[in-house]
């Protein structure tokens, strides 16, 4: 009788390794050992350069806090012009951001949903304030809304005088706010899957419902980030404000323009006012931004 057995035996459990795989593993091991020092050096260099950036920014900001004193801060806060500048800054930014949201939300939605050449051109055009020198922007506003501007007939017919008024301050702030706000919100809208809108339209949702009930709730972080960046930009605006809105105490003088005025009289108070500006706007908004990113 012939006995049938398993001729393969234990060879069936042996792993068959291709010569190509062995060569690849050997090469990887060689280069890993050969260039491990270089990789560590690269990481160290990147960390060093990143640290330089942080030190550079912190050093400049810290110089303001180190150059002032509690006495100067107390004297500045008690100054009537400082309180007026804070009031004008806060109120004007509040009005400006409301207008910016009202105008910027529909604009961001339309541009994000339509990839036509016209929309791309409009999207690029609205970014011009980001690269336009502030004094040039102020001059352009004078030539647009001034007594001899291209809209002077309409403005004079309404018995309005925009230059060097609170309305001029709001116009300046909206002008610098819009690009930052719309860019942030547009990016948020574009990140939403197009199938979400298609599904909503299948169920009969109107365009306004898609915007306010779907897209905006899904873009809360980009919306708030845009508001934060826009407010910080408006709080620091100087050149266009001086050119078009002026520097009238209690009327158009913001914290930024008040710093310039005070620097000509008392440098110590000017530095203290700069610290007040940072504590009033930058620190609370940065904390809010960090909170948003941590959620």
Image (cartoon, grey):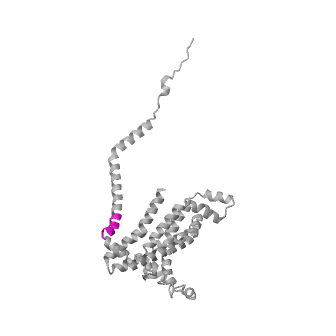
- Left or right side of 153 for 131: left
For the point 40% across and 68% down, the residue is: 279
Residue 163's spot in the image, x, y percent? 48, 84
**Quarter residue 108 falls in:** bottom right
Percent coordinates x, y for residue 223 in the rendering: 53, 64
Compared with 61, 264 (above or below) is: below
> Start and end of the magenta stretch?
56-67
| Residue 168 position within the rendered picture, expressed as x and y whole percent measured from the top left | 49, 81
Position of the N terminus, as image quadrant, is top right
| Picture residue at 64% right of the left edge, 64% below the top | 209
Outermost top residue: 1
Asked if residue 67 is positioned above or below residue 190 in the image, the reply reads below
Residue 66 covered by magenta stretch: yes
Magenta portion: prevailing SS class: helix
Residue 102, image quadrant: bottom right
- Residue 101 screen position, x and y as percent: 54, 70
On screen, residue 51 versus residue 138, left or right, reads left
Q: Is residue 238 in sight in this rendering?
A: no
- Can you say whether 200 is above or below 170 in the image? above
Instruction: Give the number of marks.
Output: 0
The residue nearer to you, when weighing 191 against 181, is 181
Left or right: 20 in relation to 160: left
Q: Is residue 57 magenta?
A: yes
**166 or 197: nearer the eye?**
166
Q: Is 116 in front, or is 266?
A: 266
At 44% from the left and 38% from the top, the residue drawn is 21
Res. 81 visible in picture: yes
Residue at image position (42%, 70%) is 280
């Amino acid at each position: 009788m012939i006995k049938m057995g398993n001729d393969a035996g234990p060879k069936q459990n042996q792993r068959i390794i291709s010569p190509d795989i062995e060569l690849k593993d050997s090469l990887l091991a060689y280069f890993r050992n050969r260039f491990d020092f270089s990789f560590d050096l690269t990481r160290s260099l990147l960390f060093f350069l990143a640290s330089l950036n942080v030190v550079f920014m912190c050093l400049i900001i810290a110089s303001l806090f180190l150059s002032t004193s509690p006495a100067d801060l107390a004297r500045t806060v008690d100054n009537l012009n400082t309180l007026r500048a804070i009031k004008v800054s806060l109120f004007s930014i509040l009005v400006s951001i409301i207008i910016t949201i009202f105008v910027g939300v529909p604009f961001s939605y339309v541009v994000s949903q339509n990839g036509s050449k016209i929309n791309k051109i409009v999207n690029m055009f609205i970014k011009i304030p980001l690269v336009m020198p502030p004094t040039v922007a102020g001059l352009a506003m004078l030539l647009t809304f001034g007594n001899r501007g291209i809209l002077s007939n309409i403005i004079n017919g309404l018995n309005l005088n925009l230059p060097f008024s609170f309305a001029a301050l709001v116009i300046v702030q909206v002008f610098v706010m819009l690009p930052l706000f719309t860019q942030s919100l547009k990016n948020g809208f574009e990140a939403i899957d197009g199938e979400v809108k298609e599904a909503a339209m299948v169920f009969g949702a109107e365009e306004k419902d898609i915007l306010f009930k779907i897209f905006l709730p899904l873009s809360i972080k980009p919306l708030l980030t845009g508001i934060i960046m826009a407010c910080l930009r408006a709080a620091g605006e100087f050149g266009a404000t001086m050119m078009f809105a002026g520097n009238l105490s209690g009327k158009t003088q913001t914290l930024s323009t008040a710093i310039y005025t005070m620097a000509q009289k008392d440098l110590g108070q000017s530095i203290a006012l700069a610290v007040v500006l940072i504590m009033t706007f930058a620190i609370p908004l940065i904390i809010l931004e960090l909170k948003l990113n941590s959620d």
